[in-house]
Image (cartoon, grey):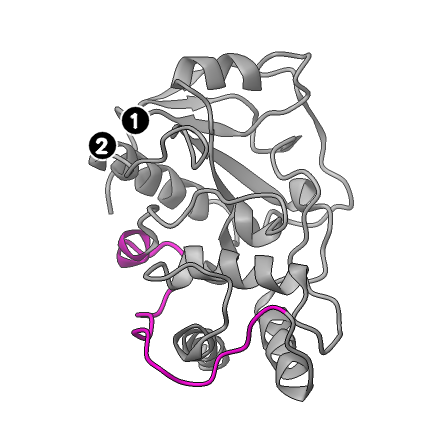
Amino acid sequence: MVLLKSIEEFPSPNHGPRVGGEPVDILLLHYTQMQSGEVALNWLCDPRSKVSSHYLVFEDGRVVRMVDEERRAHHAGVSLWAGESDINSRSIGIEIVNPGHEGGYRPFPNAQIDAVIALCGDILARHPIPPERVLGHSDVAPLRKQDPGELFPWRRLHGEGIGHYVVPEPTIRGVSLAAGARGTAVGLLKQRFRQYGYGLADTDEFDDEMVAVVTAFQRHFRPEQIDGIADLSTQMTLDHLLAALSQR
């Protein structure tokens, strides 16, 4: 495990008390989607923005703490995981400097990922966060968010003991489910996604919400092809993840 170096303090006023008394059990990773780390830092600490995160990791590996872990930072927005909608009250948020899909999305530098791994390891040593609840923003808000995106090295983090991961099934020809499909097969697939934690209505229609969830899943777990189509590779990768959970 990479060791965490020093953490700089740059307090944000945008926080409040955690609600509900539940323990912190989600670690949520974001990208900043801004032109620079300094712009992101200033925005996350500007009272006018009303947004924040517990930590910010720069491309050179610099780590800044903006909100104490005991407080509720404003990073998840409207979101849902495993039936829980107040993700902010039960999570720690890490913003990772990257311009994002709309600003020139690019691979995350090694120094930055080393720092993310070290920071995550430090957080996980203090909080009872299960591997399957180390998530991306797009997992909990698939209709709104794409971050940290398909270039984020989830496999590398898993190799360091962070997060839940299985080797994705390669894309192969076979029966796929896609937008507009209806029926029992769609309903059962939605049930499996809900079992993993994704927020989906209990219907048998492959609607816009389902397309967004499949796309988010592919960004996280099967980034070889991101198209919102539940091909055999996507479905089999989901089943392998569920099987791994059942064996724990």
Q: Which residue is mark 1?
A: 59
Residue ID at (39%, 18%)? 36
Name the quadrant containing residue 179. bottom right
* Local crowd size for mark 2, using a 10 Å CA cut-off: few (<14), some (14–19), many (≥20): some
Name the quadrant containing residue 198. bottom right
Helix, strand or loop under label 1: loop
Does the CB distance between marks 2 and 1 fall below 8 Å?
yes
Residue ID at (30%, 57%)? 155
Q: Which amino acid type corresponds to the residue marked 1 in the rendered image? A: Glu
- Residue most extreme to the left: 110
Looking at the image, which is closer to me, 182 or 73? Answer: 182
Q: CA distance from mark 2 to mark 1?
A: 7 Å
| Percent of width and height locating residue 58 | 34, 24
Residue ID at (24%, 47%)? 1
Residue range of the region highlighted in magenta in the rendering: 155-179
* Residue 111's disc number: 2
